[in-house]
Amino acid sequence: MQITHTIAELRQALAQRGRPAFVPTMGNLHAGHISLLHEAKRHGAVTVASIFVNRLQFLPTEDFDSYPRTWDNDCAQLRAAGCDILFAPREKDLYPEPQLFKVQPDPALADILEGEFRPGFFTGVCTVVMKLFSCVFASTGGGAAIFGWKDYQQLMVIQRMVAQFALPIEIIGVPTARADDGLALSSRNGYLSAAERQQAMALSQALQALAAAARSAPGSLADLEATAMQALRAQGWEPDYLSVRQRHNLLPPAMGELALAPLVVLGAARLGSTRLIDNLEF
Ligand code: PAF
């Protein structure tokens, strides 16, 4: 695996290697990231992973400083998975001057769900992803980029960004990797204490229960969501939202659509000081 830090080094490493398949990450890699890399091999001649903890997508109150940085372990996992090129820019390589231009998604997409509780998050994500795409794909004429469905809204926002800016990049979504008890794999799971880890599957269970209730007892969705949030609170969680949405636009479904429409239930909740997200299509 070739390790590159600057954009020039990356582009040199990519020269004459064929179509890149790119997996952007913030490091602290786990089996979910590695499944993205395995998928990448099916979509390109050369696999590229990036590790960059992007300050722009953290609120001042969030965990940017304490976000786990596990360089040696990340490199070992990427090597073992057969990654060809690692792009690990330092902050000065990616943001050599203050970022004066940002990619701001429409509030209809970006100020709901995660965006309601993390204002500016999707502007930070889109800005860095656009910049990383430019680093990887500008000299190759396009390629594929692989994201996990665990970050459901993020993946949707990026799909729209790529379509609306007509970027020659194929966006591939990979199903969420889960622990045996159903907990979605996430870098932030490492913050959980042993006792919290025992309770952590309650989030995915709450989403399953809400999905089943929405299909079988279509009453007021707001009531069903409130009941699901209350049940999670009773287990020691502090939910931000548990919400049933239409898959194609993440808006609430109309009553008549509950029985048949392709839906997704999304949730975000805090267990102790750890905020986790998950979702389930149904
Ligand atoms: O999902 C992530 O890890 C990040 O949001 C991403 C896409 C790497 C951008 O920083």
Image (tube, grey):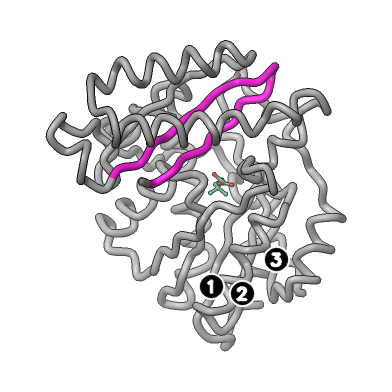
Residue 201: x and y in percent read 64, 34
Q: Residue at x 45, y 69 (%)?
A: 138
Residue for badge 2? 47
- 276 in the magenta segment: yes
Q: Residue at x 49, y 44 (%)?
A: 151
Tag 2's secondary structure?
Answer: strand
Badge 3, how many Cα within 10 Å: few under 14, some, many 20+? many
Residue 107 in the figure: left or right of residue 199: left
Residue for badge 1? 21
Hey, what amino acid is under mark 2? Thr
Hey, what amino acid is under mark 3? Leu
Which is more toward the observer, 278 or 64? 278
Q: Is mark 3 within 8 Å of ligand 1?
A: no
Q: Can residue 214 be seen at all in this image of the molecule?
A: yes
Tag 3's secondary structure?
Answer: strand
Residue 1 in the figure: left or right of residue 142: right
The residues bearing labels 3 and 2 have C-alpha atoms spaced at a distance of 9 Å
Badge 1, how many Cα within 10 Å: few under 14, some, many 20+? many
Hey, what amino acid is under mark 1? Ala
Please provide the residue range marked out in magenta. 263-281
Residue 275: x and y in percent read 61, 26
The answer to which image quadrant residue 104 occupies is top left
Q: Residue at x 60, y 20 (%)?
A: 270
Outermost residue, left direction? 256
The answer to which image quadrant residue 263 occupies is top left
Residue 160 in the figure: left or right of residue 229: left
> Are the residues tagged 1 and 2 within 8 Å (C-beta)?
yes
Sequence-first tag of 3 and 2: 2
Q: Residue at x 62, y 16 (%)?
A: 235
Residue for badge 3? 86
Residue 43: x and y in percent read 50, 78
